[in-house]
Amino acid sequence: MNILITGARDSGKTALARELSKRLKGCGGIYTEASYLRGRKSVYHAVHVLDGTKRTLLTLTKNGPRPDLRGFVFAQAALAMSKNMRAIMLDEFGPLEASGTGFRTALNNLIPVYRGNWIITTRKTLLFTVIDLFGFSDFELIDMDVTDLDTALRKTTCLLK
């Protein structure tokens, strides 16, 4: 079962992705983790689901986000290494991926051949882009704006058994 997780910023999408990554056997891919400076998000890291290693994806500056190419290479490698896993976590499919950059190269290679379960976090504005790109006709939508973390964990864990 493919699972799309959506919701507003700070609604719990990544918290759900992180917890699912820990609980599901045979899950690969990445989730993101933020670092804070003076109470504000300052850096986003990609965390490899299989071993917990992480690399900086981008730094938030007063002039906007500054991507770190090494972090994106790391994330793409983590996704590619997950091609034989039961499930692949992708937190998150965002504007970079929608525009053809970010993790898109790894996704373009995986989508045609991967037959397992995708677990993808994305913004509501990108839902149809994700559905079209991945060719999803059957998926479960978890909206973290109206679902608490415990309920979402129970539901997704049951769906992926």
Image: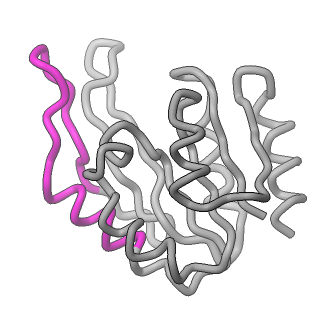
**Picture quarter containing residue 13?**
top right
Q: Residue at x 79, y 21 (%)?
A: 146
Q: Residue at x 65, y 80 (%)?
A: 115
Decide: is 12 above or below 161.
Answer: above
What residue is drawn where x is 80% and y is 40%?
Answer: 152
Name the foreground residue: 120 vs 58: 120
Find out whether residue 74 is within the magenta segment: yes
The outermost residue toward the bottom is 84
x and y, in percent, of residue 80 in the image:
39, 77
* In-front residue for pair 139/69: 139
Q: Is-magenta flag for residue 18?
A: no
Q: Is residue 127 left or right of residue 150?
A: left
Question: What's the image's color scheme?
Answer: one colour
The residues colored magenta run 55-79
Look at 86% across and 37% down and name the residue there.
151
Q: Quadrant of the C terminus?
A: bottom right
The quadrant holding residue 51 is bottom left
Please determine whether, in this image, residue 63 is positioned above or below residue 144: above
Q: Position of residue 141 (x, y in %)?
A: 76, 42
**Mark count:** 0
State left or right for residue 91 relative to residue 97: right
- Compared across the picture, whether 147 is left or right of 120 comes to right
Depicted 38 relative to depicted 128: above or below? above
Query: Viewer-proximal residue, 37 or 124?
Result: 124
Quadrant (top left, top right, bottom left, bottom right) of the N terminus: bottom right
Which residue sits furthest left?
63
Q: Is residue 117 above or below residue 133?
A: below
**x, y percentage for residue 150?**
82, 37
Residue 49 point in image, percent of width and height: 50, 65
